[in-house]
Image (tube, helix red, strand yellow):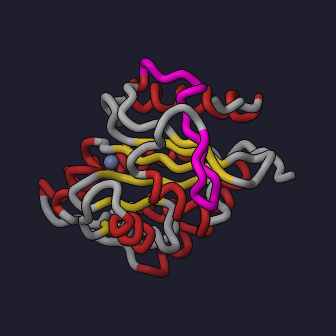
């Protein structure tokens, strides 16, 4: 049996609390979706929700630990989407937390294979002119991870074709806020395209907004824990 450190147990509790908040807000149900958080003290991996365990039964000791070399620890198997979490944590050092959901509006767009374009200025919060939609691949496969990472290039969110939504952030708290924002934008975009053809903002305006939002976020966001 693996001994969990105080850091792992504390972060595990944060992960469970975030899972329950996703459920309370109607962003995830049952065992759908998964969350990971990078270990700050020892930069050797991250914690990830276990596979097939309902959120209301989850205990901090159930959270799985994955090292960046892929080695596993913990009493439960990691989420079936551990490859995406591992690949993002390896290739995107700025990412401290990842939230994957099957939230209704974002998933509806993902099933239509419709990226979210610059119909609203807040789309720039995710790093560019749009939130892309990845091609479909079977859940839990390396192929899905490759396609999702492609769609995430230069972005902090992507729709996953016929599957759901993924959001990356420096902290878990920020990832939660961005998940709510992405789902809200998906809802607004679905309503807009149901009623007509929304106007799209030009690239230079989205670039301007992206800079303004980055300055705003830097001022208002709580600081992530200092790196060792
Ligand atoms: Zn999923």
Q: Is residue 26 above or below residue 77?
A: above
Task: Name the residue at the front extreme.
Answer: 1
Q: In this view, does 160 lie to the left or right of 36?
A: left
* Whether residue 215 can be seen here: yes
Quadrant where the N terminus sits is top right
Q: Residue at x 83, y 49 (%)?
A: 226
Q: Is residue 216 left or right of residue 19?
A: right
Q: Which residue is drawn at 66% across and 62% down?
A: 94
Q: In this view, does 47 lie above or below 142?
A: above
Residue 46 vs residue 99, the one in the foreground: 46
Q: Hey, which quadrant is residue 34 in on the image? A: top left
Task: Name the residue at the left extreme.
Answer: 195
**First to last magenta residue range:** 56-73
Residue 13 located within the stretch drawn in magenta:
no
Q: Hey, which quadrant is residue 6 in on the image? A: top right
Q: Position of residue 183 (x, y in %)?
A: 36, 46
Q: In this view, does 28 lie above or below 90?
A: above
Q: Which residue is drawn at 75% across and 32% down?
A: 5
Q: Residue at x 49, y 67 (%)?
A: 155
Q: Where is residue 194 in the image (x, y as percent from the top left)?
A: 13, 54
Q: Position of residue 4 (x, y in %)?
A: 70, 31
* Whether residue 180 can be seen here: no
Residue 180 vs residue 161, the one in the foreground: 161
Q: Where is residue 124 in the image (x, y as percent from the top left)?
A: 48, 65
Task: Name the residue at the right extreme.
Answer: 228
């Amino acid at each position: 049996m693996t001994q969990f450190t105080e850091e792992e147990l504390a972060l595990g509790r944060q992960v469970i609390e975030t899972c329950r908040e996703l459920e309370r807000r109607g962003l995830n149900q049952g065992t759908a979706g998964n969350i990971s958080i990078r270990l700050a003290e020892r930069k050797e991996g991250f914690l990830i929700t276990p596979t097939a365990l309902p959120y209301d039964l989850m205990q901090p000791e159930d959270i799985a630990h994955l090292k960046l070399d892929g080695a596993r620890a913990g009493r439960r198997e990691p989420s079936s989407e551990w490859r995406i979490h591992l690949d993002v944590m390896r290739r995107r050092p700025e990412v401290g937390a990842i939230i994957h959901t099957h939230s209704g509006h974002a998933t509806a767009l993902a099933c239509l294979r419709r990226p979210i374009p610059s119909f609203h200025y807040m789309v720039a919060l995710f790093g560019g002119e749009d939130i892309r939609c990845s091609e479909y691949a079977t859940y839990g496969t390396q192929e899905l991870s490759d396609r999702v990472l492609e769609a995430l290039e230069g972005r902090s969110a992507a729709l996953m074709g016929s599957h759901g939504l993924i959001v990356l952030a420096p902290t878990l708290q920020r990832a939660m806020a961005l998940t709510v924002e992405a789902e809200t934008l998906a809802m607004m975009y679905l309503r807009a395209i149901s009623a007509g053809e929304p106007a799209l903002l030009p690239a230079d305006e989205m670039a301007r907004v992206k800079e303004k939002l980055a300055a705003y976020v830097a001022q208002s966001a709580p600081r992530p824990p200092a790196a060792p």
